[in-house]
Amino acid sequence: MRKRYTLALFLAFLSFFGPARMAQSQQSSGTRKITRQVASAYPDLAKKMNLGGTVRVIAVVGADGEVKSVEPMGGSPVLLKAAQDAVYKWKFAPGAESKETVELHFTP
C-alpha cells in the first residue's frame, strides 16, 4: 500500500512539473502593447529542484508606459521573485494608467 501511495505521488509530481526543458515564454493578457520585454532569470534553487510552472502577476502601468508596481497573483514562490524582477523592467506603450495581467512560464 505504501509503495502505491509513493508511486502515485511521484507520478503526480512528474505530471505537474512536466518534462525538463530550458525554454521560457512570457505574455501579457492586457490591452497595452509591450514595447520592451526583459526575459526573467531562472532561479538557481528552481534549477536544483527541477521546478517549473506558470507565474501570474498584475503589473500596474503608468501613463508613460513604465511599470509602477507588480502584484503576485499565483505561482510558485520560488519563481515569483524572478518574475516580478523581470516585469519591473518591462515597458508598455503610453496610455492611461492600467493594470496588466502577465503570465510567465518557467520550464527547467
Image: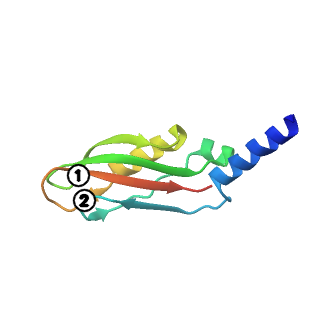
* Quadrant of the frame with the N terminus: top right
Q: Which mark is residue 92?
A: 2
Q: Looking at the image, which residue sits at the far top? A: 2
Please report whichever mark, 1 or 2, sits nearer to the chain's N-terminal start: 1
Point out which mark residue 55 bears. Answer: none
Q: What count of labels does the image hold?
A: 2
Q: CA distance from mark 1 to mark 2?
A: 6 Å
Q: Which residue is mark 1?
A: 66
Nearer to me, 23 or 102? 102
Tell me what residue is drawn at x 25 percent, y 59 percent: 92
Q: Residue at x 81, y 44 (%)?
A: 7
In this picture, is 19 found above or below 87? below
- Residue 103 image offset from top left, x and y in percent: 41, 54
Query: How many neighbours does mark 2 have within 10 angstroms: few (below 14), some (14-19), or many (20 or more)?
Result: many
* Nearer to the camera, 63 or 5: 5
Residue positioned 33% across, 59% down in the render? 29
* CB within 8 Å, label 1 to label 2: yes
Where, quadrant-wise, is the C terminus in this rendering?
bottom right
In this rendering, would 106 be left or right of 70?
right
What amino acid is found at the position of numbered circle 2 in the picture?
Answer: Phe
Dot 1 amino acid type: Glu
Image x and y of residue 83, in percent: 44, 48
Secondary-structure class at tag 1? loop
